[in-house]
Amino acid sequence: MGLASLVERAVGGALPVQLEVYDGSRAGPPDAPARVVIHRPEAFSRLLTRPGELGLARAYVAGDVDLEGDLFALLESLDDLELRVDLRALPPIVRALGPGALRPLPPPPEEARLSGRVHSKSRDRRAVIHHYDVSNEFYRLVLGPTLTYSCAVFGSPEDSLEVAQTNKYDLICRKLGLQAGQRLLDVGCGWGGMLLHAAGRYGVSGVGVTLSREQEELATKRVAEAGLAERIDIRLQDYRDVTDGPFDAISSIGMFEHVGRSRMEAYMRRLHDLLRPEGRLLNHAISRPGYTQPDTTRGRAVALGRRVLTAAGSRLTSRIDSDFMQRYVFPDGELHEVGVVVSMLNETGFEVRHVENLREHYPLTLRRWVANLEAHWDEAVELVGAGRARVWRLYMAASAVNFERGNIEIHQVLAVRPEGGRSGMPLRPSF
């Protein structure tokens, strides 16, 4: 019996996707929209020694496994798969693989290996470098000309990515009530997109801080090319080290995920101190839904970035911050439930004035990024290597599926620093 049939038997049969193995065997529906192709025995070693999403992710990043066809359909199928591994079916697989089948393999070099105190300044810098100091040209291929690495806002699903990213920046500017002559701090400024939009269209001056040297260098160049160098200051700086407040407004777009629960209060107090009375803060961040009671009656398939099948094989554990994301994508990243964020803002002296969930907009954004990456695959591999390109393809596609299914969300939370009961907000703001 071929390895594909042995695998199908081990997981209870009825595979939703086609499985092809290097021994020439196949299983699953031949007309499936996607295929899992196992190229080498090392794939089985990784899966047997580290069951679950991490073993699969390591095999894919290392090139031992390919995910072909419609990647989104494949991930949706795996998410729906009822996985009941029959332990009695594993010994035939091990025997077929021969000696060394259970020998642990070193992880791919793309896996992060951080040390030091979590969310210390030095470790946060290394975490940011792991993700962002990859290649500016690689990010340009994926993100498009706006170089904006956060959820866009679509007027309709047919909007281009560039139009939707401009919509997002404009929405934030309106929520912040930006006016000419005001001073804006953009925390985690990336390649400068928010400041370029705010300065160019709303006449503000601003400071942008990032821990990525590559982002700082390119953002500074973009600011100079736009003729805004006298009004925009891009810094390689931790937000904790910003001392030249007060600012009229603060934007934090796609940075809060790196802060961590242990630093959340200090983060908010720091931004509160940097904001003038009646100034506004816009916190734009991925979040997780509230806790739900896990289904302990059966094991389920792994959805990368959400669920992990435990070693016992019978208990479902909710893992928004998954092993794959922690080790390959956002080391030390944490997602928070929006109610916790709102409560903490209120407790640290802010007054929350508006909350908006943009969940449906992020899969539209992510699918366009995946399309950009796949359309420029050879160039992307040349820039960052096959392993890292595979990481980005998998994490963006899996994230899109998780947003579509409501497993993760994204919120914009608008808050003000009130002064003597005055918020500075209009009675009925229109954003």
Image: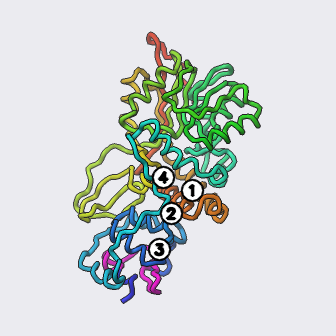
**Residue 36 marker:** 3
- Cα distance between the residues tagged 3 and 4: 22 Å
Q: Which residue is mark 1?
A: 367
Mark in the foreground, 2 or 3 = 3
The amino acid marked with disc number 2 is Phe
Mark in the foreground, 3 or 1 = 3
Q: Quadrant of the N terminus?
A: bottom left
Q: Which residue is mark 4?
A: 329
Considering the numbered disc 2 on the image, is that residue within a helix, a strand or a loop? Answer: helix
Where residue 134 appears, as percent x and y from the top left, is 58, 51
Where residue 310 appears, as percent x and y from the top left, is 28, 61
Can residue 132 be seen from the camera position used here?
Answer: yes
Mark in the foreground, 1 or 4 = 4
Q: Is residue 264 above or below residue 150?
A: above
Q: What is the crowding at mark 2: few (fewer than 14 residues within 10 Å), some, or many (at least 20)? A: some
- Cα distance between the residues tagged 2 and 1: 9 Å
The amino acid marked with disc number 4 is Val
User: Which residues lie in the magenta part?
Assistant: 7-28
Where residue 67 appears, as percent x and y from the top left, is 50, 70
Q: Which residue is mark 2?
A: 72
Residue in the image at 44% along x and 86% along y: 25
- Cα distance between the residues tagged 1 and 4: 17 Å
The amino acid marked with disc number 1 is Arg
